[in-house]
Amino acid sequence: MISKTAKQMSSNYHIKKSWTLGEDGQQKYYQSCKAANLNVKKTTKEQDLNHVDFFVDGKSVDVKGLKDTHKEGKILIEIKNVQGKEGWCSKNGPEWIAFDFGAFFFHAKNSDLLKLVKSKCNLNEKVSKISEALYKSYTRKNRQDVITIVSLTDVIKECEHWYLPSRNWSLPMELA
């Protein structure tokens, strides 16, 4: 779900692209969980605003759609959101973050991601382009977000994680 503040800061094209990416990723994730015989439940809109998209076997999960950084073996991490409030990678965030890598969803324990950011990233070193944000801090123009990028290799080495094979979806999760 995209917040009202984020909508006010983005073009209609960007909002539509983000919305579609998120919705498609969530449908794909839901069907992948069902195919793997996992107990999956979609959250309420209020829970969704708090960075929780699903409960899977009782654990909270936030799903991140397929991004260009994933194709490069990297993960984008949101420390603060566009309003400057806690991002999804925080001590109050969901237990797991599921990143869409196309053929599979890579789950990383959120608390471990936060530890990785604190140990490996220099958030005091600010860069002006997202392409330069590997282990550094990036804030988009006219926003208060703080974003960094880490390598998937480091996440695999330092974070509790698990994989979920991707499955093509055919039914909306409301009808399954």
Image (cartoon, helix red, strand yellow):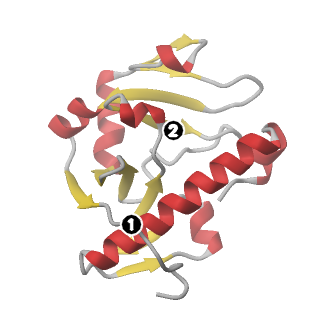
Q: Nearer the viewer, residue 11 or 161?
A: 11
Give the left or right position of residue 83, taking residue 54 as reference: right
Which quadrant of the figure contains the N terminus?
A: bottom right
At horizontal 33% and vertical 66% (from top left) the residue drawn is: 167
Rounded to the nearest angstrom, the CA distance separating label 1 from label 2 is 27 Å
Task: Report which quarter residue 116 is drawn in.
Answer: top left
Find residue 63 and name its label: none
Task: Report which quarter residue 174 is drawn in.
Answer: bottom right
> Is disc 1 surrounded by few (<14), some (14 to 19) or many (20+) residues within 10 Å?
few
Q: Position of residue 83 (x, y in %)?
A: 71, 40
Give the left or right position of residue 162, taking residue 81 as reference: left
Amino acid at dot 1:
Asn
> Is disc 2 surrounded by few (<14), some (14 to 19) or many (20+) residues within 10 Å?
some
Q: Secondary structure at mark 1?
A: loop
> What residue is pinned by disc 2?
78
Amino acid at dot 2:
Glu
Q: Secondary structure at mark 2?
A: strand
Could you tell me how many numbered marks the image carries? 2
> What residue is pinned by disc 1?
168
Figure check: 43 above or below 100: below
At horizontal 62% and vertical 41% (from top left) the residue drawn is: 81
